[in-house]
Image (cartoon, coloured by chain):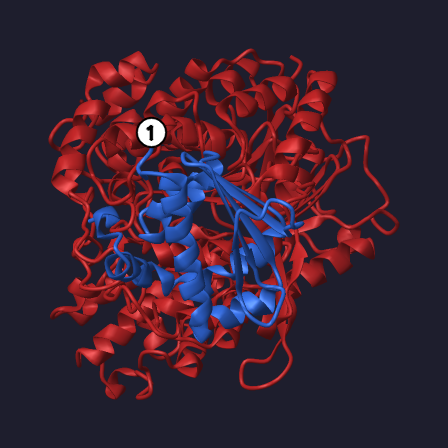
Amino acid sequence: MGLFKSSEEFEEMLSGFFRLAGSRPEIARPLLDSRLIIRFTYSDPDVVIVVDCSGDSLDVRPGDTTTKATVNMTMKAEIAHRFWFGKVNLMQALTRRQMTAKGPVPKILQLLPAIKPLYAIYPEYLRENGYADYIVS
Amino acid sequence: MNAPGGYAGAILHVDLTSGQTHTSPLDPEFARHHLGGSGFGARFILDELLTRRGAAAVAAGDLPDALSADNPCVLMTGPLTGASMHAVARWTVGARSPLTGIWGEANVGGYFGAELKAAGYDGLVITGAAPRPTYLAIDEGRVELHDATPYWGLDTFATEDALVASHRRGATRAAPPAPGSGDAGARGAAGRTAETGARGADARTARPGHVLCIGPAGENLVRFACLVNHRGHVAGRTGLGAVWGAKRLKAIYVRGTHRPGPAHPDRLAALRTELDEVYRESIVIEALRAFGTACQWDIGAVLGDVPMGNWRQGEWERFDDLGPLAYADKLDPRARSCFACGVRCKREVEVTGGPFRMERGPGPEYETVAGFGTVCLNSDIEAVAKANDLCNRLGMDTISCSATIAFAMECREAGLLEPEQGVDPGLSWGDGAAIVALVEQIGGRHGLGDMLAEGSARAAERIGGSAGAFLTAVKGLESPLHDPRSFHGLGLAYAVAPRGACHLSGVGYWVESGGMYLPEIAELAEGLDGMNSTGKAAAHVAGQDYGVFFAGCAGFCSLGGMVLTATQAVDMVNHVTGFDYDLAEVTALGRRVWYLQRGLSHLFGARADDDRLPARLATPLADGPTAGSAPDMDLMLGEFYALRGLHLDGLPRRDVLVGLDLGDLADLLGT
């Protein structure tokens, strides 16, 4: 059993966070410019979330296993959680296959500056939405 | 005596004082014991010193000044240099460093190393000094010294163009002989052809060779002058361009067509097929292909690896102005590569207008963008590209040059440098025009540039006051642009590297920062927590032993070779050479060479007091990803000294050296 109580809880928690990201113009704009459709496939617990940047606004679709994504990212739920705290060395996670990324690597890397503000937002989001127990010190 | 696979089988010795050259065969046992690159270089330098000065003088520290004729200089390839594989174009230059006074070494890629081997030589040992500007030409089996007076004063690009054009015209035979200090008649009058092989080719019709040269900075003895081949491929660190300047050696032109083959071509082909898949699938390689070395930029920012404001701040609102997107938008980058490498992480750029206009040429790499960018708080990527272009042309190391300029900016801010000292009144943080102007002043030794051309450590001594607190150098070598507050083990690596601050003296940094994964080496197999000093000494000892074999001796590129496991790397060396190394033997080899490099630095005077991280790099930052983090140097140094068997004065224990077949070094050190 991993860090999270259930797949439903983790799905709801992360989907909410992605929607919050989509509501922030400074973050949403570069994501929408990329036109990417990103599928996150998490394990322990098993959750799939698609973040669709191909439209006019960010569309977050939990459980979407059918849409053809341009980027497929896989990782354990705990790795994803720690990543948003800035506690994961992205390069180390990728080289050790704790995280995989399939798709146009240049476009993925170009998003890194855009998502930087999310590291500070994530703990606030958890605190304000009933997930304070998951805050990593 | 047949050479092992991958080796040309010969070392060329050049005495610039007498104008004489001779070739010595490469002993296969020596090759197996030292492999190449740093291993060959350090051993040849020590042997040269012993031969020319005697053991008693060497042991007493009676050694030649770095800028004297007696300072030998070596260029050494590895067995893989020139192989048709990704990420193996590297080779090594070594000598006593004019910047640090200790063992100096620079590792470089490009095309020159592969060409040198195809011309019949695994390496060169250069001694003496020519009475006037001279260049060496190696064309197949033909070795000649020529007058370089017409090229003295030219920048590196112009020198390369002129020499290639000259040799293409077949001007070799018409060039005047370079006068030696002895009887020119005794050496023959026609271009002083020292060796004429049977493979001489018609230079007028053959493809051109490659040039390694110094620019005006080397001629002016700038202490961080470098050697440049194929324009932007630079043996940058430790000022070895000034060693050539002191020897009045302007360039080496080399051309060859006899590339040595691998011992086991079928096995190598099978490995190449296996690695094709690795290179196709690796996100690290994909990132290098997409953005060049600047691909580290954004990840580095998240991890706190990129220093800013002369290493005083952890955040900067203009950071993204220098990132890969700005680079692509403003510099129109195109990919270029080293010999036979499909990673293509090098960049060519241009600036088409404005104050920093530059014609298309080699673009700044990560270290240079950080050095002239974030460290100087200069957010203009075009100014960075221009400063880089000038450094390439003048022949200067961008890391030391940018660090020294940032140091000067802080001195100016602190009121330690005033206009009457030749300082541009506008020299202030972020002033791209002032940075570019100062690069030119340093290369030409004009105004303030004359003092800064001595390097930041010497400049701090002259300036006095609190200037020493602004330094980022270890043993006089300015730190590369990776922050040990983000990766604590890097602080140890900087402190104890034989040549001074260096992130490439082992693979510890690459493992700690996450780019390299070596599951076969126990100390490096687990992921390392960057901002923690515990266990880092053991990891970095293992990383040094393996890294000296990998990048120092074999010829692997630390970037393009990052995706290789240790098994794949050892296999490649075995398939090329025909040796039957295992991982234990290559790490023992790397260890032996590490002690040899460190031993040379000890002979040149380095001791435990020099194994120190500058306070600036060990002071926690108030903001940014590493806020509050600092390497525990006492802990790591204590563990490191125990693991390496070092006495309190820094010298290795005798039994450690004897166990590595370095008894002669133990005798010289009196340990």
Q: Residues within 10 Å of mark 1 (few under 14, many from 20)?
A: few
Residue B515 vs B346, above or below: the answer is: above
* Amino acid type, residue under disc 1 in the picture: Met
Chain letter, colour red: B
Q: Nearer the viewer, residue B122 or B373?
A: B373
Q: Residue A94, can we see it?
A: yes
User: Is residue B163 found left or right of B567 in the rendered image?
Assistant: right
- Position of residue B608 measured from the top left corner of the image (x, y, whole percent): 16, 38
Quarter occupied by residue B278: top right
Hue used for the chain lettered A: blue
Q: Residue at x 73, y 31 (%)?
A: B259
On the image, numbered disc 1 is attached to which residue? A1
- Position of residue B510 measured from the top left corner of the image (x, y, whole percent): 41, 40
Q: Nearer the viewer, residue A1 or B48?
A: A1
Residue B291 vs A47, above or below: the answer is: below
Chain bearing mark 1:
A
Q: Residue at x 32, y 56 (%)?
A: B304
Residue furthest to the front: A8
